[in-house]
Structure formats: structure tokens, C-alpha cells
Image (cartoon, grey):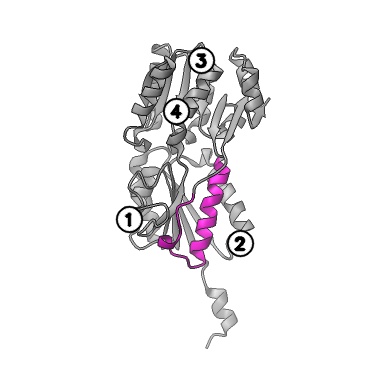
């Protein structure tokens, strides 16, 4: 008979399966997640294992990737965006899911914030509630811009959200040109469409895919010398002009906390949906200078983060 020590040595640490929309080259989540798990007392390879699969910007691959993760028998699945969470819910009926998306309740992915129901809990970043505020800030930064390009991803839009943005644009005296980007192949045509429409500023809507391809868009906006509003402050630290949102690393921390609770035996049905409470206005004065834009002094003073 094996001794208790030998039995423990043969036990395999629980697996955390992670489904990502973007590619490994643009990955932000994994290093932050590993760091936060370590802070919560988990040791990679000893008390947990991690398997991360990437859709490389192709949302149609999400169901197959989720099925692959499910075959590996994870203790918990982590999924992002409406499409990723839906794929996880279809493939993993009995596996706890920790999701991060714009609004899990509005998207019908959970029943309520307090009692999510089923096998899914997670983080609602409530990004679309800030879309109008971001448009207002973009207007403050570039008041001369009247033609605004909006880059969106229909996979992650909430019904009626663009209509709200259109209504706000009318109040500001702005005209919107909307382009939809869902795959890498659609990026270049979308940028060409913005150029053809002679937009004078651009707002990027919430999307895991658009975030994963942020470097391409930052470079394009710099080349076109267009003021651009992004979601995450980290994007401004990478060269974007302006953003307004919670830090994405803080949202990832919420995910890590929920995963830790599930690994310790909590059930998703008993874990309320979390949401960030702190929002950061970030501006990049170096990027502004490079595109020939003078940022209003009041905006610089208001900013929580100023990147030179």
C-alpha cells in the first residue's frame, strides 16, 4: 500500500483553462493572472496548472478551442467577451466558468449581479456605459474634429449601444462613421474606410479582439495623425492618445480572486458578479505632440495618468 506521502505526490494540481480571443504575441492577461494567483497563495505547477488557448482574432475558432479545453478536464474555465463566454457555456455545462465581459447580465450570460445562477460568475467591466463619456472626452481633446470614426466589433456590441452613441454625437454636433472589424483581414479595409471618410478623430469601442490588435491601430492612428480614444489606460502607456476606463490589470485581478475562490471549493452560483470601481483617465502628451495636437491644459490637469 502506498503511503499518504506518496499518494499526495502523485496528485495532479487542478487545471485552469483560459480561452483568449487574441494571440499570444499580444497577450496581457497571462502574466498578470499568474502574478495575482501567486499573491493569493497559489504556486504554478504545484498547486495549479494553467492552459491558455488563443483564437488569434478569429472568433469562429472559440467553440473548438473551448471543446479542447474541456477535454483536458479543467477545474475552472476562464473566458472573455460575449462570444468567448457563450462558447464556454455551451461546451462546459458542469465546469465552473469565470467570465469577463462588458455586461454579463445585459448579454444574458448570467441571471443577475447578486445571484448569477448556473455555472458562471465573473466580472462585468460595464465598458459600454462609458462610451458616451469617452466620446465627450474625445470631443474635449479635439474640439475641432466634427467627423468621428467609430471602430466596433459586432461580436461584442450590446443592442442599442451604437444608437446611444449616435444620439450623443448629435448633441455634440458630431457625425459618426462606423466601421466593423471582427477579424485581422478586416483591419486594413476598415482603416482605409476611415481615411476615405476623412474622419478627424477615432473612437475604439470595447472588444477583446480590438484590444488584442491595438498595436496595429496605434500605428495607423499615428500615421494618419488622428486623435484616438481607446478603452484601457495600458493602451495609452503603449502609445495611444487617450483612454478612460479601469485599468485592465485591475479587472484581471478580480478574475484571479474569483478563480481562487472556485479552486478552494466555492460555487459560481454563490459568487456575485464583480465590477471595477476605479476609473482612470490617461493621456499621452508625446503622442499628442507627434500628431500635431495641443492637449487642453485642463485635460492634462484632470488626467490620472500623463505619459510623456
Q: CA distance from mark 1 to mark 2?
A: 28 Å
* 75 vs 104, nearest the viewer: 104
Compared with 62, 191 (above or below) is above
Task: Return the x and y of residue 12 as percentages of the image width and height.
Answer: 51, 69
Q: CA distance from mark 4 to mark 1?
A: 35 Å
Which circle's residue, 4 or 1, is located before the other in the chain? 1
Which circle's residue, 2 or 3, is located before the other in the chain? 2
Asked whether disc 1 touches disc 2, contact meaning CB atoms under 8 Å apart, the reply is no
Q: Which residue is mark 3?
A: 224
Q: Which residue is mark 2?
A: 43
**Residue at the image position 50 percent from the left and 57 percent from the top:** 258
User: Which region of the structure is painted magenta?
Assistant: 248-274
Is disc 2 surrounded by few (<14), some (14 to 19) or many (20+) residues within 10 Å? some
Is disc 3 surrounded by few (<14), some (14 to 19) or many (20+) residues within 10 Å? some
The outermost residue toward the right is: 308
Q: CA distance from mark 2 to mark 3?
A: 46 Å
- Asked if the stretch drawn in magenta spans residue 268, the answer is yes
Secondary structure at badge 4 equals helix
Q: Which residue is mark 1?
A: 91
Is residue 77 something that shows in the picture?
Answer: yes
Is disc 4 surrounded by few (<14), some (14 to 19) or many (20+) residues within 10 Å? some
Q: Main secondary structure of the magenta part?
A: helix
Amino acid at each position: 500500500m502506498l503511503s499518504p506521502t506518496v499518494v499526495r505526490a502523485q496528485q495532479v494540481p487542478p487545471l485552469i483553462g483560459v480561452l483568449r480571443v487574441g494571440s499570444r504575441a499580444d497577450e496581457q492577461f497571462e502574466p498578470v493572472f499568474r502574478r495575482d494567483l501567486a499573491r493569493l497563495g497559489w504556486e504554478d505547477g504545484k498547486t495549479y496548472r494553467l492552459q491558455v488557448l488563443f483564437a488569434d482574432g478569429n472568433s469562429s475558432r472559440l467553440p473548438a478551442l473551448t471543446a479542447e479545453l474541456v477535454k483536458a478536464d479543467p477545474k475552472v474555465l476562464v473566458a472573455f467577451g460575449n462570444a468567448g463566454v457563450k462558447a464556454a457555456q455551451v461546451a462546459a455545462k458542469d465546469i465552473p466558468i469565470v467570465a469577463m465581459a462588458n455586461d454579463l447580465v445585459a448579454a444574458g450570460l448570467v441571471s443577475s449581479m447578486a445571484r448569477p445562477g448556473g455555472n458562471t460568475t465573473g466580472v462585468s467591466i460595464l465598458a459600454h456605459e462609458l462610451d458616451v463619456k469617452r466620446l465627450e472626452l474625445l470631443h474635449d481633446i479635439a474640439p475641432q474634429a466634427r467627423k468621428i470614426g467609430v471602430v466596433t466589433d459586432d461580436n461584442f456590441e450590446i443592442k442599442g449601444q451604437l444608437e446611444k452613441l449616435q444620439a450623443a454625437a448629435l448633441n455634440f454636433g458630431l457625425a459618426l462613421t462606423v466601421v466593423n472589424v471582427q477579424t485581422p483581414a478586416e483591419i486594413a479595409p476598415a482603416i482605409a474606410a476611415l481615411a476615405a471618410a476623412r474622419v478627424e478623430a477615432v473612437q475604439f469601442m470595447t472588444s477583446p479582439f480590438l484590444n488584442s490588435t491595438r498595436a496595429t491601430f496605434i500605428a495607423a492612428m499615428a500615421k494618419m495623425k488622428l486623435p484616438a480614444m481607446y478603452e484601457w489606460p495600458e493602451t495609452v502607456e503603449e502609445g495611444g492618445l487617450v483612454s478612460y476606463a479601469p485599468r485592465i490589470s485591475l479587472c484581471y485581478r478580480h478574475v484571479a480572486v474569483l478563480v481562487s475562490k472556485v479552486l478552494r471549493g466555492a460555487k459560481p452560483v454563490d459568487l456575485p458578479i464583480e465590477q471595477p470601481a476605479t476609473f482612470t483617465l490617461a493621456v499621452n502628451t508625446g503622442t499628442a505632440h507627434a500628431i500635431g495636437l495641443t492637449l487642453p491644459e485642463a485635460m492634462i490637469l484632470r488626467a490620472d495618468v500623463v505619459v510623456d
